[in-house]
Image: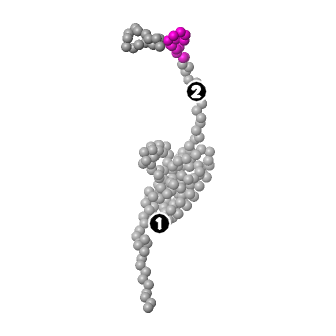
Amino acid sequence: MNQPEHTAAHPATAGTTTITDAAAAKVAAGAARTVAGVHSLGVGSNRALGALRGAVGAGDVAQGVTAEVGQAEVAVDITLTAEHGRPLQRIAEDVRAAVYAAVDELTGLHVIEVNIEIADVCAPEVPEQAVPGPVVPEMPSRAPTTGSASIVDPDTPGRMEQP
């Protein structure tokens, strides 16, 4: 006997998925950090505050990145500090390409724009040069240079011990 096949809906296909602005921003931030020439995300005091939060384990992974998620699309804004000596337009192009690819692949959202603000350039560290300071004369030693040394016994005033 032939019985008709019954197909049941897979529970994994039912329901909705919502990707928040914060989640999309973190994906974009991760992609931006991988690009050569990106020193850090964010700028100035935000970076310093982020480093402090990171030191206590409460760092903001998406610092310097915001995302606005719509129904099926996302727009991303990134503020970054570039490394000195690298072409800024090239860094921006590379960041934009990395963010488009990562956000599309990892979230499934259509990226409509990636706006990049290069707010600072991290200058290379200049080695400190020795700056001559005031010359402090050495104090003469009070220890005897010849003969036997004497040690003052602090418990007996005026009494000296021989070592």
Q: Is residue 37 left or right of residue 74?
A: right
Task: Inspect the magenta stretch and tell me whether residue 141 lies in it.
Answer: yes
Q: Residue at coordinates 47% horizontally, 59% vertically from top-left? A: 24
**Quadrant location of the N terminus?**
bottom left
Residue 12 in the image, given as x and y percentages of width and height: 43, 71
Q: Relative to 14, say whether 153 is above or below.
A: above
Residue 58 in the image, given as x and y percentages of width and height: 42, 48
Query: Is 15 in front, or is 158?
Result: 158
Give the amino acid at mark 2: Val
Q: Which residues are magenta?
A: 137-149
Give the amino acid at mark 1: Ala
Q: Relative to 135, say whether 63 is above or below.
A: below
Q: Residue at coordinates 43% horizontally, 60% vertically from top-left? A: 20
Q: Is residue 68 visible?
A: no
Residue 163 in the image, given as x and y percentages of width and height: 47, 13
Secondary structure beneath label 1: loop
Q: Viewer-nearest of labels 1 and 2?
A: 2
